[in-house]
Image (cartoon, rainbow, N blue to C red):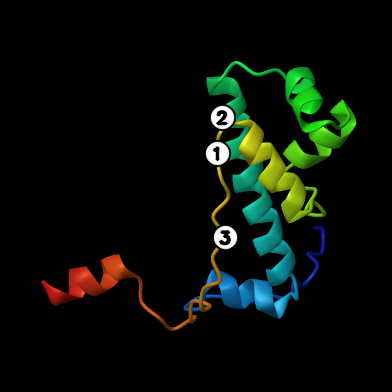
Amino acid sequence: MKERKARKRHDYSGSSFDSLLDEHGIREEAEAVATKRVLAWELEQAMRKQQKTKQAMARELHTSRSQLDRLLDPRNTAVSLDTITRAAKVLGKRVILRIANPRMAHQRSRSARKASAR
């Protein structure tokens, strides 16, 4: 019979996803990728709605197609606010940036508070 390797088990029950990311030291990176993914998706949706090709978009931005591909790549977080703002403007949009307080791991969600109030 084969011996099974003993695996180190982590007990994450009761902890939040944010605390898990903090424990592994990747929270900031995960948040940056998530934010960029949303921005890239919103730009692509606006391009699709306006039937604007990448080539036409790059031309209006006065940039290369490869530079536009980096802007639309959800994993590439090294994109300047200037580039994002210019892309939004070409699409007839604007960028709204907000700084918010971090969510606390122990803070209950709005839906959980509503459910417990019933």
Quadrant hosting residue 62: top right
Residue 105 x, y percent position in the rendering: 49, 80
Name the quadrant of the C terminus: bottom left
Q: How would you rate the neighbour count of disc 3 (Cα within 10 Å): few for under 14, some for 14-19, many for 20 or more?
A: few
Residue 21 x, y percent position in the rendering: 66, 71
User: Image check: 32 left or right of 116?
Assistant: right
Element at label 2: helix
Which residue does the image show at 82% across and 54% down from the upper left? 78
Residue type at mark 3 is Leu
Q: Which residue is mark 1?
A: 93
Element at label 1: loop
As measured in the structure, the alpha-carbon distance from the residue carrying label 3 to the one carrying label 2 is 18 Å
Instruction: Name the disc covering residue 97, or none.
Output: 3
Which residue does the image show at 59% across and 78% down from the upper left? 19
Q: Nearer the viewer, mark 1 or mark 2?
A: 1
Q: How would you rate the neighbour count of disc 2 (Cα within 10 Å): few for under 14, some for 14-19, many for 20 or more?
A: some
Residue 83 x, y percent position in the rendering: 76, 46
Q: Which residue is mark 2?
A: 46
Name the quadrant of the N terminus: bottom right
Which tag, 1 or 2, sits closer to the chain's start?
A: 2
Q: Residues at badges 1 and 2 in contact (C-beta under 8 Å)?
A: yes
Residue type at mark 2 is Ala
